[in-house]
Image (tube, coloured by chain):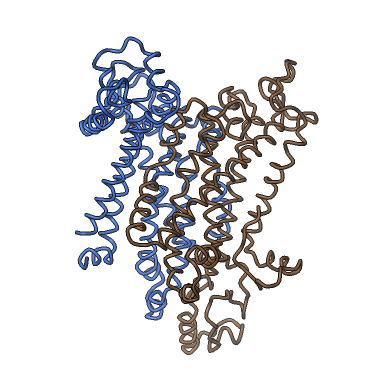
Amino acid sequence: MAFIVRRLIFYVVAAWAALTVNFFIPRAMPGNAVQSVMAKFPDLQPSAYQSLEAMLGVGHPGSIWHQYWSYLDDVFHFNFGVDLIEYPAKVSTLLSQTIPWTLTLVGTATVIAFVVGTALGILAGWRHGGWLDRVLPGLMFLQAIPYFFLALILLELLAVKTSVFPLGQGYTGGLTPGWNGAFIGSAIDHSILPAFTIVITSVAGWMLQMRNVMITTIGEDYVLAAQAKGLSSRRVVFTYAARNALLPQLQGFGLALGFVVSGAIIMEIVFSYPGIGLLLLNAVTSNDYPLMQAIFLVITFAVLLANLIVDLVILVIDPRARARTATR
Amino acid sequence: MTVALPVSTDAATPPTERQSLGRWRRLPFKAKVGAVLLGVFVLAAIIGPLVTPYDPSFQNPAPALSMHAPDAAYLLGTTQTGQDVLSQLLVGIRLTLELAFVVGAVATALAVIVGVSAAFLGGVWDEVLSLVSNVFLVIPAVPLLIILLGYLPQKGQTATIIVLSVLGWPWGARVIRAQTLAIRNRDFIAAARETGEPTWRILAFEIVPNEVSLIAASFVNTVLYAIGASVALAFIGLADLNSWSLGTILYWAQSQQALQLGAWWWFVPPGLAVALIGTALVLLNTGIDELGNPRLRDASNASRIAGRKLRPTDPTPVLMDTELLAPEPPRRGALARFAHSFSRSSLLDDNGGGGS
């Protein structure tokens, strides 16, 4: 299991790097963020003050190393301090309210886009020069449109002008969130347009990448051999070419996730979707530094976790990765 | 924009006009479209601010000019405060492209330095540099950008350029490192080393010139990333909102409810400009890819031989095929069926699309 151990070490290092960057940003930035926070919220409780100390380094409770250790300790216990805007709500409470929304919407939409894009890429790679190649420039244009711009246009056309879809938000006001039909139906209804936006703008990227890998893979000798054996086209495409082309595609999926999540954050803002992106914007516009930093950590850890899952999937479907672990 | 393309003809003689024309002709079609489209925007960025019909920040107090629909005097209409949208757009294209190209240049330079030295130095250096670039790669950039800019008291152009450049190099570094590793052990590098060339000379004159297409692709990608990120950041207000870039125009249009009030001429042109610049860059990149990997080229430029499309990379067609020899409809006999099935296995695909 050397492969897994190696990857795990990498993710631990990456997580540590993110934590450290997060720790030093407020301390290294010009202008005293902490003082502006203190000036803005003069009536902080002692307990809030303490956690602010840990997150931002207010005052000087000990050396920088001491601050660093207490910060790491806080993060490990999911103690992100008290939120300044919605005082005395805890940051971790705010996060646990918004994360499910983002995870469901962005997760589902990204997986759909990846699956559809990869399938189209397989087709386009196999039928090289076919009709899919001809619509490719159009798809590239869709991909180049900024997420938020497409989101706003779709919102205007399909929600404001024609009211096919609801206007932003996560669910119809007045419903109580929970496992009841009315709420879930409303939530799904509200998520179609945002999900559609994500799929439309990211499908071309997956497709192009898969197409290119497919074309290269089809040129390999084992594909020719499979055809020479007289196997059916379907079998050659899916079992021989696509299966091998999928590996770089999956690796790319892990790495591109950061970009996808970034775009989705902005998209949430447009749709006033009650997810983590909107929370981040609100935090930034109101200088709510503890919340900002906690959100950054959460997003980073989510991307790292997704990458780890991709690694495990690769381990399952790629015999070479397993063989490497055995020999190492 | 001029991308140095790796179709070097004879290095000794400078390319004559006919040669460079031939070079242009050999470019993949997608790259040509991308280059022309990008050229239009670069031209707009260069001469645009000189020919703006109005001062983009001038607020015309006349009530008739508030959200004025496009007409002869105001080709793209006006904003709520009577500013000319076309003027804003022309100035905005310059600022956005300027930022993107500077970020592209700085980040690509960093990528080349890190990638080449990681691969060439090897050992611990390689491990460390690769680890750093992989860590930067998995940490999502935009949230980090948002909190960094959120802390900065002045969110000017320079701050954005620095932050975007610092976060924009890892992808290129990764690709360039892989390529350098592949080149490093070639004979001509060994020969250069044997003749006593210093390491820096080998790096600068033997290795880097062989990676020009990769570096160009990495530059184009970084520019694309810089445009996307800077426009998105400006749109949510994390930029100098007193200067005109495509992102800030969109920010003001959105905050003044341009779309809801039906002022499409205020909101659509800047977004469309971003999308078109992005498309141009993607096309250019695909073109560069195709140049390096002929297999990816469009099958439409394949020559037709006896009714079948064949590309230069396909194997020479086997002319035992009855269909190829006689372009008449296949006969229905057992022999014809046999010949037909034989031809199918020699050419991979019914419509000739498969590649070799």
Q: Is residue B213 visible?
A: yes
Q: Is residue A186 visible?
A: no
Q: Nearer the viewer, residue B319 or A2?
A: A2
Placement of B6 over or under A149, stated as above or below: below
Residue A200 horizontal side relative to residue B280, left or right: left
| Residue projecting furthest to the right | B72
Q: Quadrant of the C terminus of chain A?
A: bottom left
Q: Quadrant of the N terminus of chain A?
A: bottom left
Quadrant in which residue A153 is drawn: top right
Residue A237 horizontal side relative to residue A137, left or right: left
Residue shown at the point (77%, 36%) measured from the top left = B51
Residue A210: x %, y % from top left: 44, 59
Colour given to chain A in the rendered image: blue
Colour given to chain B in the rendered image: brown
Residue B241: x %, y % from top left: 58, 26
Placement of A312 over or under B179, stated as above or below: above
Residue B118: x %, y % from top left: 40, 58
Quadrant in which residue B93 is drawn: top right
Residue B178: x %, y % from top left: 42, 62
